[in-house]
Image (tube, helix red, strand yellow):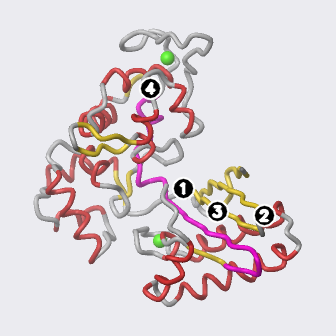
């Protein structure tokens, strides 16, 4: 994830929507007292509450890049600086949905097959991921030998868990350059925290292209440029995009949405000369609630 430098942010704040100052006030009023006592756990708790409140004030029917939660939000107080970066998880594809009951979901498999092709990643790694997740010990390609590790045979609980899977090295995970071309890593396209429906208002070009064989780079770019002017209020509005047609729409409809449900907040906390990273996963089905919180 890219955290924009705080100072660059402050100078760019002017261009951010006016209501952001209100949102900052919410953060400040929540955080101010605790930061003075420099109690990191108190700060964590406050930050979590603030993110929760922020997400509760947002329109849940539609989520897109440009809404206030999608901006990096700096809060400066005394000798403390807190930077909050929130990413909806429905911008990614969730590999846990490759398995339905005991079987491979064929349509989801096709999507991942395309994704791996687009990212120029060996298909065997996709099979290894399936082996990791599915209960069966005799999946495609056979159960991989993990040495002292065994395939988990259960859904991924964290993104970092991908790194335990055979073939997922630094380059596959973080991204790489092959023959002068950049390919993003799995961490930029996959999330085990999503509800399985890709948000067409936040998904990257790569994820959009994986959704259907007829969505090539040109169509994916047309979707992204369309939503910049006019975020999609309904999935059916995709039909207004150049290159889209009713057949594509029909095929991708079960896998897409215009809103998100899960949000990962990464909060950099600097108190004097101490630095912390707080990561919070929140779910917004109904009232926003914290799923887990980790402090580094
Ligand atoms: Ca929204
Ligand atoms: Ca397995």
Label 3: how many residues lie within 10 Å, few (<14), some (14-19) or many (20+)? many
Mark nearer the N terminus (1 vs 3): 1
Mark nearer the N terminus (2 vs 1): 2
What residue sits 34% from the left and 53% below the top?
A: 256
What residue sits 31% from the left and 69% below the top?
A: 232
Mark nearer the N terminus (4 vs 2): 2
Residue 257 coordinates in the image, percent (x, y): 37, 57
**Relative to 76, 35 lies left or right:** right
Disc 1 versus disc 3: distance between alpha carbons? Answer: 16 Å
Q: Which residue is mark 1?
A: 262
Dots 4, 3 in contact, CB < 8 A: no
> Which disc number belongs to residue 45?
2
Residue farthest to the front, as pictured: 273
Q: Which residue is mark 3?
A: 267
What residue sits 73% from the left and 52% below the top?
A: 295
Dots 2, 1 in contact, CB < 8 A: no
> Which disc number belongs to residue 129?
4
* Count of picture labels: 4
Stretch in magenta: 76-100
Disc 4 versus disc 2: distance between alpha carbons? Answer: 35 Å
What residue sits 50% from the left and 60% below the top?
A: 87
Disc 4 versus disc 1: distance between alpha carbons? Answer: 22 Å
């Amino acid at each position: 994830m890219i955290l924009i430098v705080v100072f660059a942010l402050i100078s760019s704040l002017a261009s951010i929507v006016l209501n952001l100052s209100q949102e900052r006030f919410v953060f400040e009023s929540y955080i101010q007292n605790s930061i003075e006592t420099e109690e990191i756990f108190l700060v964590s708790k406050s930050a979590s509450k603030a993110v929760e409140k922020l997400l509760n004030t947002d329109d849940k029917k539609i989520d897109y890049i440009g809404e206030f939660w999608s901006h990096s939000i700096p809060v400066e107080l005394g000798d403390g600086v807190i930077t909050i970066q929130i990413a909806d998880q429905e911008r990614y594809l969730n590999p846990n949905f490759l398995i339905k009951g005991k079987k491979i979901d064929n349509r989801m498999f096709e999507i991942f097959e395309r994704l791996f092709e687009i990212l120029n990643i060996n298909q065997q790694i996709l099979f290894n991921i399936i082996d990791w997740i599915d209960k069966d010990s005799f999946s495609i390609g056979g159960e991989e030998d993990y040495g002292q590790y065994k395939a988990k045979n259960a859904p991924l609980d964290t993104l970092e868990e991908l790194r335990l899977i055979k073939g997922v090295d630094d380059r596959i995970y973080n991204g790489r350059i092959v023959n002068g071309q950049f390919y993003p890593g799995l961490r930029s396209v996959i999330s085990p925290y999503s509800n399985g429906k890709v948000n067409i208002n936040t998904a990257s070009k790569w994820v959009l292209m994986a959704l259907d064989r007829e969505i090539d780079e040109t169509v994916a770019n047309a979707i992204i440029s369309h939503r910049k002017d006019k975020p999609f209020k309904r999935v059916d509005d995709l039909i207004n995009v150049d290159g889209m047609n009713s057949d594509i729409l029909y095929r991708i409809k079960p896998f897409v949405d215009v809103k998100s449900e899960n949000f990962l907040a990464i909060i950099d906390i600097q108190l004097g000369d101490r630095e912390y990273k707080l990561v919070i996963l929140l779910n917004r089905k109904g009232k926003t609630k914290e799923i887990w919180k980790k402090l580094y």
